[in-house]
Amino acid sequence: MSTEIKPAIVKQIVMVDLQTQYRRLQKEIDDAVLAVMDSTRFIGGPEVDGFKTELAEYLGAKHVIPCANGTDALQIAMMALGLKPGDEVIVPTFTYVATAEVIALLGLTPVMVDVDEETFTLDLNQVEAAIGPNTKAIVPVHLYGQCADMEGLMALADRHGIHVIEDNAQAIGSDYFFSNGRVAKSGTIGTFGTTSFFPSKNLGCFGDGGAIFTNDDELAKMAAMIASHGQSKLYTHDVVGVNSRLDAMQAAVLRIKLRHLDDFIARRIAVADKYDAAFSNIDEIKTPVRDKRSKHVFHQYTLVLNGVDRNGMKEFLQENDIPSMIYYPIPLHKQKAFVNSDSNRSFAVTEKLCDSVISLPIHTEMEAEQQDHIIEKVIEYINKS
Ligand SMILES: *Cc1c(COP(=O)(O)O)cnc(C)c1O
């Protein structure tokens, strides 16, 4: 009996290679984390304050309020706006669940709209059609690392007196280019921006973390107060809040990673460029559209398949030691948790995307041979199917 041993052609491929990235930055990160342990300032303190200031500087945002995760960041932003049960918040139906979850949790009504077929972000015509007397906020999601049409959206929101909360969990570090030449970092354009430092995000920590950004002094104060039990000063509670903190060890890791964020983004874009070049002439594959109005920071590299058996391709890639993911297989309006009168409406673009997208490995540590192997196997599957 002989056991076939597959030769390891390339270093094991993962969706996001956090381990190699850690090893590359290990000395810096270990020193910083050990220093926090030695200081025993685990909550608040100089690391959290330092990160707050450095992130605000990087983003060009007036205020950064760190919190426990990206979901809390959305919730705190909505609480700070004083949204009340019955208020409606417009969200894309093609997104991660967190966006709609906090809306429902606060007793607000999520109103789902479809996305644009090219950018996978909010379709502004549909947003406009969904605005009613109870609409209080719109949450664009900068999906996969590409900004929604923020110039158009802000004009629309301003016309109707509606707040915009940018869910920037997938696009931190992206630039948005306005038609008048103004450039702003994603997440700093709306009333609030929110982000997540979940380990696999473009700026990830070693656990959970998140932050809220705003240029409004009063709203910043309110959000900070809400994140800290509604406390205005010690043991004085002005509003009902939550307990949502970024701890000092995570802040220490993030301060180091923030210094590398532009390099991380450049590495991701280089991987995307190489995929684009390899797949550009294949009819069955649509490569990501890069909207000229912003810089795509490629949290995900997501193909749209046309006439290809997606499950078959996923399995074929897996047999060749290549992981892939479907972000997202089920749209929000079809999720049991959010089934309502909207659920029978048609969201044609989202429904098509949920059936045809596939995300390939992309991260800061991709080796040329690894990516060559992925490209070769994707093309091999298309050619034989
Ligand atoms: C990751 C993510 C979140 C939630 O972040 P957590 O830190 O996991 O709570 C919210 N929105 C989007 C679009 C995300 O990708």
Image: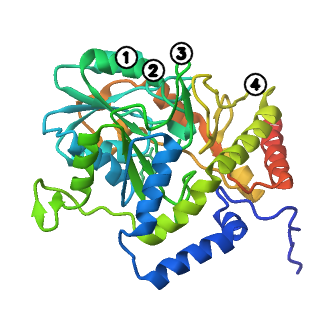
Is 111 positioned to the left or the right of 295 in the image?
left
Tag 2 secondary structure = helix
The residue labelled by disc 2 is 151
Nearest to the eye among marks 3 and 4: give it.
3
The numbered mark, 1 or 4, whose residue comes first in the sequence reads: 1
Q: Is residue 206 visible?
A: no
Indicate the quadrant where residue 204 lies. Answer: bottom right
The residue labelled by disc 3 is 179
Q: CA distance from mark 1 to mark 3?
A: 12 Å
Which residue type does callout 2 highlight?
A: Glu
Q: Is mark 4 within 8 Å of ligand 1?
A: no
Tag 3 secondary structure = loop
Are the two marked residues, 4 and 2, in contact with CB atoms closer than 8 angstroms? Answer: no
Q: Position of residue 332 (x, y in %)?
A: 37, 39
The residue labelled by disc 4 is 283
The residue labelled by disc 1 is 155
